[in-house]
Image: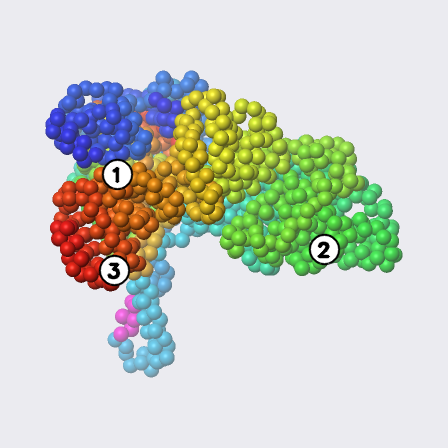
Amino acid sequence: MSAAGLERPQVVVHAQQSLNYTVFDCKWVPRSARLLCLGSAPRGTGVLQLYELRGGRLLLLSEIEKAKPIKCATFGAASLQQRHLATGDFAGSLSIWNLEAPEIPVYSVKGHKEIINSIDGVGGLGIGEGAPEIVTGSRDGNAYNQEERVVCAGYDNGDIKLFDLRTMSLRWETNIKNGVCSVEFDRKDVNMNKLVATSLEGKFHVFDMRTQHPTKGFASVSEKAHKSTIWQVRHLPQNRDVFMTSGGAGSLHLWKYEYPAQRSKKDSEGAEMGVAGSVSLLQNVTLSTQPISSLDWSPDKKGLCVCGAFDQTVRVLIVTKLNKV
Amino acid sequence: MGDESIMYSLDQGTTKTYQIPIGHLDYKFIEKCTDVQHLEKILRVLRSGEEGCYPDLTLFCEKRIEHLAPGSRVLRKDKPAATAADFTAEEWETINGELMSWVAEMNEDDNKPEFLKTGTLHEGQDNLPPIRCSSSCLPAFQNEKFQNKQRNKKNIPRDYSEWDKFDVEKECSKIDESSEENNSKARFVSRPPPPLIEKQVNTTGMTKKEKIFIATREKEKGNEAFASGDYVEAVTYYARSISILPTAAAYNNKAQAEIKLQDWDSALQDCEKVLDMEPSNVKEIVLPVRGEAALGKAEMGNAQRKFHSKGGGSKLEDRGTQKQKESTESGLKKGTEEKKSQKTDHEGEANGYLNSNQTSESPEAGQSSRSHGAGSLSAGAAHSTSLPPAAAKLKSEGNELFKSGQFGEAVPKYSEAIEYVISVGERSPDDLSILYSNRAACYLKGGNCSDCVQDCNRALELQPFSLKPLLRRAMAYESMERYRQAYVDYKTVLQIDSSIQAANDSVNRITKTLIDQDGSSWREKLPPIPVVPIAAQLNRWDGGNFTSEVKPKSPTDINKEEQLQMNREKGEEKFRTLKNEGNDFVKKGKYDEAVNKYSECLKLNTKDCTIYTNRALCYLKLHKYEEAKQDCDHVLQIEDCNIKAFYRRALAYKGLQIYQASVDDLKKVLLIDPNVLEAKKELEEITQLLSLGGVAVADCQQKQRKKITIQEVTDEQEEGQLETAEDVVADNLSSKEAVQKCVPSRTCEKLTISEPSNAYDFGQIVNAVNASKDQSACADLLTITDPKKLPVLLSNKLEGEIFLIFIQSLAHYILGKDPGLVYQHLFYLSKAERFKVVLALLSKNEKEQVQRLFDLLTENQNHQYSLEELDSLKKVYEL
């Protein structure tokens, strides 16, 4: 490798742990060196494991088995003091857990008839003010919440829809032609800035959400990577312009979004329209032969992230030199 | 590429995928191919191995693509995660160490949970924000309207008693209101405005850890907004971060964002905050920012007159930032109260570089005491003894006031002092000059530029070429936008002391402005720059002693030494920057400016050969061969085997048309390094010129010297730059490529002398003309050639091409002037040898051209030839 290559961020596997169940999601517990893995055991029950990072290894602290497989989880609506976990399971229930007493949920509600595929929250972790809110998405896609009180959902037919919760209306929709696997705003607690949507056939789209044109909507740039489904996209919590995508072939790509010189311009009729920037690849690594289905950056330690793959392994990664990008 | 690819495909077939000719899977092809997409296809074929496995070729192809398009997707390879082997031991250590310490920190926090939690009630119910629902977020007036509506609804079936109380006007105004609200609602729906971000964050009930966490997060948001160019948002987030937990970094970043927004005052304020919080951090981060802020403020001052006072001064401050840093450092070393100094520093603005110039006479004296100790002040006092005591007192009072920033009050003090000195009638021009100069400083600070200029003028009358009045006048002129005068003054200042960075920068800045204003001829509009007598010049390399002449009251010796040291360092630094600037100009092709830079460099250091060779290059580009030669000579005196100097002198000699000397120099170049291709080429060319020149010079000497343009085709020149030599006297014979424009005039001149002699000469010219397809030259040739001699001159050399160019030039050039001559030529051309053969081989298109010529001849028929004659000639031409 050339000397210049070493200046780029590098991805190091710090620790890895093989599991005896299929891991669907993994999450860092805020303000701690612990992480949660959750998924489905072979016999069809749900598993929730709490690990702690210690001396380069993952140490199992506790394990709970639940009736239904758990698909997704978030700390997004939890306060830093409580750190309650919100999960969505295969039966369509949203549950909130106190990890110190995980036997019974703090709160549980059946929100969907079918599986909850995605979950996200705002108002917790010091991200954004106002009441904590959780949004869930079922069979019909993914959903994510944001400070501007909008929810974005991606559908398997390629539709992306942006709902405004203040007016309870559809604010914008588009179609990216292929099933949407994951959508995420670069930050939840700022005015809508950027949205990344990944798709089944290995493309992802970055939308600049600052300027909405009356007819053209938001400007976007797309990039092809992974040569397979992009399962997940996650923005670096400490720098919204850096994000990682995880692919169906067990690969991770680290990207950086570069803003254009002018983020908006006037069209021929004088309406403001956005100008998309460009994305550049910072680093790519292949960790597994199976899809990496979940990815989570540590909110506390820049460059630390955890990913769970369908080879039933969870890996703790360190991404170096993120300060220099 | 077209032909080759066909050839290859015929030879070897194509690849299965993409149908690329097999021949393209080749080092030579890949090396030359610039079509990235094609190369990517080739790479895919190579990687697939369907045509066999060629690891080296694949690697070569990858490298080529990387060279052409570093971001190409095919270059992305599956890579395993990095391991310890990819890092140096230290890096690996830090990566792991950092993580371990983070883990330890986190665990520590966990072990004392009370540290994270606020205590008993960790989230009081009253602390929780209200639950949001779709209507709760609607603006307040909409809620009101909602209520109104309800009330209205309720009111619609009114009973009679209610109608009694009905107020028509009130109800009308209500309706108006609601319609307004409707409008605003419509707008709201069409485009919801982004919610306003609050500048304050509610931090009640947060632990310190939480605060740090959130403050950092807000700062990061600010950084991101800054990166995306949204500075207003960035400022807001920094303010939020500060409202949670004030940190120096957040203030500093906020200042930077404010600079971008040109909110200079806030930026300066924030900088002050940083300085208050972290005085030790001053040098690296804050000063540049504050300097920028001050500069911006100054520029604004230029635009808006009322800020003039701050303008002139703080601009200076920025320019002096470098020096200020030094003075601050030295201040720190001396253990003076640094904070105080920071502040004076800010208010006193103009001090930075003046300190370094050993000034003791003026208000600044007080400030220089800040970094140089009390020496200078006492020196100032000692000096003022030469004034009458009353005046001295007034002056020192003025100085005090100036120091404390009360410029307005200082003016009358100085004025009184001046009046007193004049009334007393003591002729001490030095002191009077200083008083005027000081008053000028006050005026400048107060923004009264015209009075400042007047005082400076008086000071300069009394004390010509004294530094400070000049500098102040320059600044005043600059703020008055009288850039030419300012330029002249700054230049004069630089003649006196070339190390004043502020003046240097100002000169550059003004040069730009003037160029914008007056275009390239801006220099012509300048008033003359006075020449400073050597006695008044400071800070030359050997100029240390002069200081005492001009400024007999330099403070202490220690200061002097420090100064000298500082100046020397500054000199070197300046030398480097000048050189770099010069090099940059060369790269941009601005040779004029580059020469100026290099010349300034040479003022600082006369021993650096590279400057001379660089300047020589510029002179070459500017066709100032004599100067180039002199520079090279100079280098060669210092360093007798400098290859660049030899080469450039050769080029200069070539330009001066001293070919023999040029050849000699080139030979020397090749002696030193035989691999210099340019030199070889030049040598060949010049040798040719030399041999040709022998004849030509003789020829042309007979004729009068006449100006013609010569265009040299000098592709092989160093930078590949095309030189167009203008107004070069034509006692030189151009190389054989020199055809285009110069050929016509030159051919005919030659022909008048040599043409009649023989067929060989004629053939040579015809070949040259034919090679360049120059019809006008050919026409000239034909005009001066006697048609009767044409068959003889052509002998058996007539060819299709020659025939054609004859026809074309006859048609386009000669026909208009002299149809008779055309007829004559055509007639005799038909008598030439090989005419029939050439005619038989003419293409249809070419025949048409001949036909057209005859048609034109028929139209322009005159007494020189009859129509019958023309018809018979036509038959000869088989038309």
Q: Chain of mark 1?
A: A
Question: Measuring 11% from the left and 29% from the top, which residue is drawn there?
Answer: B10
Question: In this rendering, is residue B485 above or below B723?
Answer: below
Q: Chain of mark 2?
A: B
Mark 2: which amino acid? Asn
Q: Nearer the viewer, mark 3 or mark 1?
A: 3
Marks 2 and 3 share the same chain: yes
Closer to the camera, B783 or B603?
Answer: B783
- Stretch in magenta: B149-156
As for residue B399 lying within the magenta part, the answer is no
Q: Which mark is residue B457?
A: 2
Mark 3: which amino acid? Gln
Mark 1: which amino acid? Glu
Residue B63: give x, y in percent of width and height: 30, 26
Q: Chain of mark 3?
A: B
Question: Measuring 84% from the left and 50% from the top, which residue is drawn there?
Answer: B428
Q: Nearer the viewer, mark 2 or mark 3?
A: 3
Question: In this rendering, is residue B366 above or below B406?
Answer: above
Q: Nearer the viewer, mark 2 or mark 1?
A: 2
Residue A301: give x, y in percent of width and height: 40, 30
